[in-house]
Image: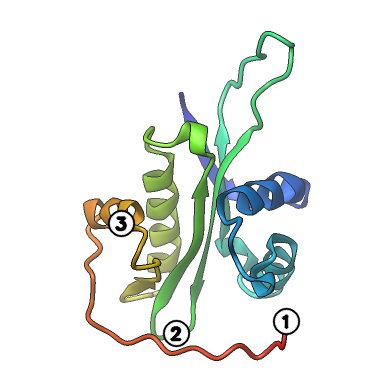
């Protein structure tokens, strides 16, 4: 199966919202997919990427697979880059799309002059930690502190 990575388009919204809701079903309300898309479209919208299935074939019922198979957000604040909410449809994992999305985000961040990329993974999600380690990311000993600004 071949994939193509491109910048998010308005017509991708429903597919990306559905993908993120499915993959990140336990996210807090502040990470509601529609809200994240709205916010990202205000700041560096070119760093919201989607992975499309090329040449999707109809199934037995005549429906084609959703062309959006994955998505990722990236950001750069002038000091470091970040990768957020990488998601690949569960049935399409282990085919290289996640790695392609990460590499595409890295390329765009590099083009902005970004010297280092950070990302966050729940410590309990060992499979995802292993995925990023295979891509060259290392676990860094840091304490993460956070404070929600929105009471929701």
In this picture, is 22 found above or below 106? above
Estimate how packed mark 2 is, as few (under 14), some (14 to 19) or many (20 or more) residues with alpha carbons within 10 Å: few
- Please tell me which of labels 2 and 1 falls first in the chain: 2
Residue on which the image places disc 3: 126
Q: Is residue 66 visible?
A: yes
Mark 2 vs mark 1, CA separation in Å:
29 Å
x, y percent for residue 64: 68, 21
Residue at x-position 56% and y-position 27% = 54
Q: Secondary structure at mark 1?
A: loop
Residue 148 appears left or right of 75: right
| Res 152 label | 1
Closer to the chain start, of discs 1 and 3, is 3
Q: From what the image shows, is residue 103 above or below residue 67?
A: below
Q: Quadrant of residue 61?
A: top right
- Distance, label 3 to label 2, CA atoms, is 30 Å
Around disc 1, counting alpha carbons within 10 Å, would you say few (fewer than 14), some (14 to 19), or many (20 or more)? few
Q: Nearer the viewer, residue 144 or 99?
A: 144
- Would residue 73 be found to the left or right of residue 45 on screen? left
Give the label, 3 or 2, closer to the camera. 3
Q: Is residue 45 above or below residue 12?
A: below
Q: Is residue 25 above or below residue 77?
A: above
Label of residue 78 in the image: 2
Residue displayed at 37% across by 35% down: 94
Total numbered badges shown on the rendered structure: 3
> Which mark is in front, 2 or 1?
1
């Amino acid at each position: 199966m071949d994939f193509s990575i491109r910048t998010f388009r308005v017509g991708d919204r429903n597919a990306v919202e559905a993908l993120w809701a499915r993959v990140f079903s336990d996210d807090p309300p502040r990470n509601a997919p529609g809200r994240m898309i709205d916010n990202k479209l205000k700041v560096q919208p070119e760093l919201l990427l989607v992975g499309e299935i090329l040449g999707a074939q109809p199934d037995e019922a005549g429906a084609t697979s959703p062309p959006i198979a994955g998505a990722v957000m990236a950001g750069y604040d002038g000091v470091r880059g970040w990768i957020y909410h990488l998601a690949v449809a569960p049935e399409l994992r282990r085919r290289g799309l996640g790695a392609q999305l990460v590499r595409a985000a890295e390329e765009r961040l590099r083009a902005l002059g970004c010297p280092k990329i950070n990302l966050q993974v729940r410590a309990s999600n060992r499979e995802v930690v292993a995925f990023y380690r295979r891509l060259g990311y290392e676990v860094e000993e840091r304490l993460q502190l956070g404070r929600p600004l929105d009471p929701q």
